[in-house]
Image (tube, helix red, strand yellow):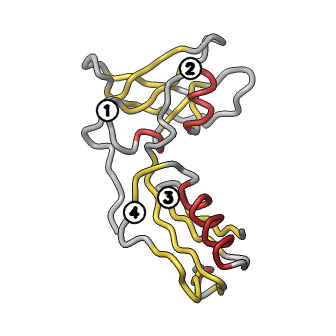
Amino acid sequence: MSWPSLKNVLFQTTIDNNKILWVYPHNYEFAGDFIFVQKSPNIDAKKTHLVVNTVDGKKLAIVEWKHENSNNLFQATGINLKNKHLSYIVIGLDFEIGMKNTVIIKKVLYKDKEPQSGSLFRGNNISRLIASREKSIVFLYRKTIWGNKLLRF
């Protein structure tokens, strides 16, 4: 399973009505996974530098930043990257926790062959449909570039 690289990705910036700087990939299939916001009085941020190449050929360094989600970007700026996330999902009727806390989905009902592009909540939506069809509780394992999650539907 391969995950995207930001090696040659150019970023755009925008400032919302609260004068907060948002940074996001320009014309990138998985742009929703790489949204960053500059620290403000209401945002708890990492105290490290984030350096990105911008579409106008400059390097932008943000001293204090936070990874953000596409829903918050849309609410603050109207920029819609909500269907530009990469995820890998497995849905089944049961699960167990294996060695090193690895999630193992059992009685698999749905499994991506490769990571798929779409809404961050793509797995949730498919899980709800399967749970309704099966008239049973189902378990969703979702892997994204930022980590893994096990959910019950």
In the rendered view of the protein, which quadrant contains the N terminus? bottom left
**Earlier along the polypeptide chain: callout 2 or callout 1?**
1
Answer few, some or many: residues within 10 Å of disc 4's Cα (few below 14, many 20 plus, some between 14 and 19): some
Q: In which quarter of the image is residue 106?
A: bottom right
Left or right of 85 on screen, residue 125? right
**Earlier along the polypeptide chain: callout 1 or callout 3?**
1
Residue tagged by mark 3? 144
- What's the residue type where badge 4 is placed? Pro
Whole-angstrom CA distance, mark 4 to mark 2, is 28 Å
**Earlier along the polypeptide chain: callout 4 or callout 2?**
2
Answer few, some or many: residues within 10 Å of disc 2's Cα (few below 14, many 20 plus, some between 14 and 19): some
- What's the residue type where badge 1 is placed? Asn
Left or right of 137 on screen, residue 64? left
On residue 77, which mark appears? Answer: 2
Between 1 and 51, the one nearer to me in the picture = 1
Q: Where is residue 111 drawn, in percent x and y? A: 46, 75
Whole-angstrom CA distance, mark 2 to mark 3, is 24 Å
Residue tagged by mark 4? 115
Left or right of 12 on screen, residue 69? right
- Tell me which residue sits at (58%, 89%) in the image: 107
Residue 151 vertical position relative to residue 43 in the rendered view, above or below: below
Q: Where is residue 100 drawn, in percent x and y? A: 59, 82
**Earlier along the polypeptide chain: callout 2 or callout 3?**
2
Single out the mark in the foreground, 1 or 3.
Answer: 1
Residue tagged by mark 1? 27
Left or right of 28 on screen, residue 74? right
Q: Is mark 1 on a helix, strand or loop?
A: loop
Whole-angstrom CA distance, mark 3 to mark 4, is 9 Å
Whole-angstrom CA distance, mark 4 to mark 1, is 19 Å
- Tell me which residue sits at (52%, 73%) in the image: 90
- Tell me which residue sits at (55%, 21%) in the image: 78
- What's the residue type where badge 3 is placed? Thr
